[in-house]
Amino acid sequence: DVGFKQDVPQVQNTFLEDPVMASVLERLLPGDVLQEITPDLVHISEWANTEGAALVDRMEEDQPRLRQYDSWCRRVDELLVTEAWTKQKEIAAREGVVAIAYERKYGQYSRIYQMAKLMLWSTGAGLYSCPIAMTDGCARVIELIGTQEMKDQVFARLTSRDPSEFFTSGQWMTERPGGSDVGRTETQAVWNEEKKAWSVSGFKWFSSATDADVTMLLARTHDTNPTAVPGSMKAGSRGLSLYLARVRDDQGKLNGVRIHRLKDKVGTKALPTAELELDGMEAQLVGEEYRGVKNISAILNITRIYCGMNCTSAMQRFVLCAKEYARRREVFGALLKDQPLHLATLANMELQYRATSQFTFYCVAMLGRIESLDNNLPEIRDRDIPLLRLLTPILKVWSAKNAFYLSQEAMESYGGQGYMEETGIGRAMRDVLVNTIWEGTSNVLSLDVLRVMAETAGEALQQYSDAVRGMMAPLRSKPEWVKSAKSLEESLILIAIRFTSYSTPEGRNVLEAS
Ligand code: MFK
Ligand code: FAD
């Protein structure tokens, strides 16, 4: 056992080792709130890098399976999730990763606290952040338009900190004819007078976290008007309504669901994503009939911010790992961190991470204000609501594209080892890639941006340009070091360098000089 052994790059506590996150939180949170939540952020970060990381490895080694028949050929459709996956559910409840946002102990700042905690927790939660995102979205829809019964029986459990009470939710939209174009949904809902419930039948092509306790789903509503021709329905997305259903009863029996198969995916392997046939699933209508797309959009707008948070979390890890390696790896007579060209690569990565981080928490702060302050306040009604509606799809697309790009840089920055499964970068790359597709592809979300501009008659765009102007104002009185720039591009690079911290002051000097 002789010869060179590379010092192992290690991130021990993401929160304590990342100056970016601390500075974002310092800017957005009042001092007393930050002080109060800091021990929890340190704790979750430590858990994520130790116990959580070990759970994630187990979730990847022992992936979910489907047992369709018992030994007597009876159809059972039993979804076998790993012990580590089940443990994640328990931890998610105990850590209050959904609850924090709805307890609103810190009012408008609760969302920032929750998303910061989620971001640190994600490293050790692996793909469990997916059901948590949908659970949060489901809770928001019930809070906004659910019945009192839904609030008492479902919302209370989605936001519970008690693992024995805690429910997770699915979000079943995508069907074989359309995932982007949900107006092509084939699933139908028929009112069952006897059961006083809707009976939903059809085929859901992608359903992630099939072990969820409840689900929100879209279906085409049969007209219940006594004068209507039986079986008549409206075409397109205006014929869809939103429903809430238990996936299994208390004994674990599926509620009119057959699991056809589990998807064989490029990544997100620990997450059970299934094809489901629905045959008389009992469900309750949520909100107004025929407003299904509008009503489910409250979930979309939450889960799309989760995608931003999740990508930011992945980028945080990529940057910290790349910097860690650069501190330990020697090449051509110097540590990587002191090689100017490599430093430039790290600077670029860090810049992308910083921008995405600021963007994510800018949106999260708005979400927190909208959820906890009076929506009739002019700054909420006229600024935050249209601005967040405009920025959410942009955040989702921007962060997903950048996070994937960063995963490639992180892989390369580890050299050949980056390409080895053991380092986990390949897995992270495959996992982060899905963010460009689920919860809306880039082109579909780009069209959504255009729709917001049109629907708000330019108001959202106006709010955006006002916000940007406000942010740029301090930069108008350019400091000396920016004045030396010969072009806008150069000044941007100088600003980037200034606001990007490096492992050593010497490193920064080298980069500034180069
Ligand atoms: C860690 C992160 C983990 C995240 C978990 C991921 C698990 C995976 C879960 C999934 O992937 S679930 C499936 C996600 N599917 C999508 O995101 C669908 C993508 N397609 C779209 O978003 C389309 O733009 C859309 C389906 C909404 C278009 O449908 P339509 O039929 O063309 O709807 P239309 O007529 O444009 O909009 C209907 C109403 O909804 C309009 O309001 P009005 O009726 O009042 O005019 C729209 O303004 C409104 N609307 C649409 N999108 C909205 C919205 N309102 C608010 N926010 C939005 N985002
Ligand atoms: P398509 O709509 O066929 O898209 C194909 C291409 O066409 C894309 O490039 C798209 O950008 C482009 N395109 C579509 N419309 C337009 C347009 N108008 N103009 C220009 N380009 C356009 N769905 C759920 O409901 N629940 C889940 O739990 C769930 N989990 C998932 C988990 C994973 C791992 C994955 C990969 C997907 C999951 N999905 C889920 C499905 C996902 O939301 C859809 O796949 C996604 O919304 C895209 O829909 P589609 O597959 O029908 O693609």
Image: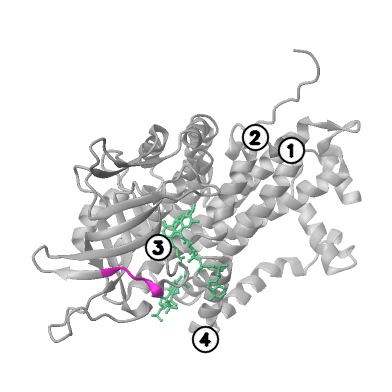
Left or right, residue 464 beside residue 514:
left
Labels 4 and 3: the sequence-earlier one? 3
Task: Report the amino acid beneath label 2.
Answer: Thr
Chain part drawn in magenta:
184-188
- Give the main secondary structure of the magenta stretch: loop
CA–CA distance in space, label 4 to label 2: 49 Å
Per the image, the residue denoted by label 2 is 423
Task: Name which residue lies at 79% across and 48% down.
Answer: 345
> In the image, what residue occupies the spot 79% across and 53% down?
497
Q: Position of residue 146 (x, y in %)?
A: 26, 64
In which quadrant of the rendered view does residue 28 lie?
bottom right
Q: Is residue 187 magenta?
A: yes
The label nearer to you, 1 versus 4, is 1
- Which element is circle 4 on? loop
Query: Which kind of residue does numbered mark 3 sit on?
Result: Ile
Tell me the quarter of the image containing the N terminus.
top right
**Which residue is denoted by mark 4 in the rendering?**
457
Check disc 4 and give the amino acid type.
Answer: Ala
Q: Does the CB distance between marks 2 and 1 fall below 8 Å?
A: yes
Residues under labels 4 and 3: Cα distance? 24 Å
**C-alpha separation, residue under disc 3 versus residue under disc 1:** 37 Å
Q: Nearer the viewer, residue 405 or 113?
A: 405
Q: Secondary structure at mark 2?
A: helix
x then y, percent, for residue 326: 77, 36
Q: CA distance from mark 1 to mark 4?
A: 48 Å
**Camera-nearest label, 3 or 1:** 1
Which residue matches tag 3? 299
* Pointer 4 or 2: first along the chain: 2
Q: Secondary structure under badge 3?
A: helix
Ligand 1 image position (quadrant): bottom left
Q: Is mark 1 within 8 Å of ligand 1?
A: no
